[in-house]
Amino acid sequence: MAKIRIQFVCQNCGGSHSKWSGRCDACGEWNTLAEETPSTGVASGPGKATKAGRVIAMEDLDGDATEAPRINSTISEFDRVAGGGLVQGSALLVGGDPGIGKSTLLMQVSASLAANGYGVVYVSGEEAVAQVRLRAQRLGAANAPVKLVAETNVENIVTTLEAGKPPALVVVDSIQTLWTETTDSAPGTVSQVRNSAQAMIRYAKQSGAAIVLVGHVTKDGQIAGPRVVEHMVDAVLYFEGEGGHHFRILRSVKNRFGATDEIGVFEMSDKGLREVANPSELFLGERHKAAPGAAVFAGMEGRRPVLVEIQALVAQSSLGTPRRAVVGWDSSRLAMILAVLEAHCGVRLGGHDVYLNVAGGFRISEPAADLAVAAALVSSLVNKPLAENSVYFGEVSLSGHLRPVSQAAGRLKEAGKLGFEQATYAKGSEVVKQLGLKLNTITTLADLVVELAAGASESLQGDPDTGT
Ligand code: TYD
Ligand code: MG
């Protein structure tokens, strides 16, 4: 009898090792190796071929190419992120933290498609049929003709699907709960997730049904799965949101049939997810006008303009090492802006605590926010509000100069649409003249500081008592 080989597979990256160790050599994560028995199925790796291959006809590159047929859910925020609707025969992964609203979103999409006459099967591996029904009732979708299956065995699921007329959409919630008989490991381990996903994707390609796999991702990467599925599927969407806030963003990170810089914005309500067509209104909603330390940043999320308020509080520190706390932005980027303000603009912040917050729980990753952050910091330091109807954008370089940013025209257009009257941005950004918007271009950060400090009651040097 052949000896059963045991391997240790990293639940984070999928790398396999012959011995257990505390740390995965491949990705450097700790405590991620789990014992798995390699499967003996097709996916078990290279072996000796038992059958000779056949010759496949080659094709020319310039042949006929048809647009993949799509099905539209009429939830336009979802359809847009998916690249204009779900593609038939394709596989889509929707990842996100547990509890963020993945099941809710997909139930709404399923119900909407089913109500429009498409066949939809919702496979729930996590919840019993009654629970799924309860959610559907809460969403007001209980009478949509969605077919429910509570099952976790892949062979049973595929056989059930093949027995009937192929549906237009199959939702599998979630991929971590599935298990296939071809693999010996426990559900949720890398090899189970990979082989189950493979079987479901194979079904999608054969039947022409669009398949959506739901995957939980934890921040510390402890739960296996979605990462190894990412390269197998046609599109990967992430559903994210900040704890305690109601808005959710659906972001596309890979899409073989569309653009990846799209986002969809939703708000979680007591009746499910509501589409937010104008995200800026959501993030500017609670704005207190004319407070020192608040600046409006004209940002872009993918191709969509999003205006958000950046709030700064600069206060005398009683600590030896002043505090720097950031929510919604990169803390090393803040350290850089503080250094540039000190070195090139004569703004002394060494004796001050600095707190920075992006309103509404939004997260900004663009360097274009530099200028708005600097404006908020200086405004708080000199205790003078910024011009109420003004937006800011521009990247700050280490020399204190401002660099133009992309899509300036789109940012200005959004600002104009929302009633802003002034925009301050880096000189050289490509813009088209906006009606009713006063454009203020600057070349260095020092220009902005001089402008903001003029007529302010407090000085840029901090409190003279502390000697800073
Ligand atoms: P769920 O879709 O179950 O999350 P996931 O599948 O990503 O784990 O949604 C979980 C949260 O959403 C839960 O805390 C309750 C909340 N929720 C609402 O606020 N309103 C609703 O209408 C629904 C269905 C859920
Ligand atoms: Mg769920």
Image: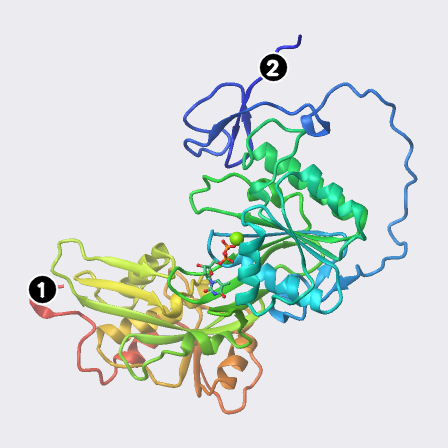
- Horizontally, residue 222 falls left or right of residue 64, namely left
Name the residue type under label 1.
Thr
- Horizontally, residue 42 falls left or right of residue 303, namely right
Q: Is the residue under label 1 in contact with that under label 2 (CB below 8 Å)?
A: no
Name the residue type under label 2.
Ile
Residue 463 drawn at (x, y percent): 12, 70
C-alpha gap between disc 2 and disc 1: 72 Å
Residue highlighted by disc 2: 4
Residue highlighted by disc 1: 466
Give the colour scheme of this rendering.
Answer: rainbow
- Horizontally, residue 322 falls left or right of residue 42, namely left
Residue 255 drawn at (x, y percent): 66, 55
Nearest the camera: 211 or 347?
211
Residue 14 drawn at (x, y percent): 56, 33
Q: Quadrant of the N terminus?
A: top right
Q: Residue at x 21, y 82 (%)?
A: 456
Q: Residue at x 47, y 52 (%)?
A: 97
Q: Quadrant of residue 361?
A: bottom left
Q: Is residue 190 above or below residue 335?
A: above
Q: Is mark 1 within 8 Å of ligand 1?
A: no
Q: Which mark is residue 330?
A: none
Residue 131 drawn at (x, y percent): 53, 55
Question: Earlier along the polypeptide chain: callout 2 or callout 1?
Answer: 2
Q: Residue at x 56, y 77 (%)?
A: 409
Q: Secondary structure at mark 1?
A: helix
Asked if residue 450 can be seen in this view, the reply is: yes
Crowdedness near tag 2: few (<14), some (14–19) or many (≥20) residues, C-alpha within 10 Å: few
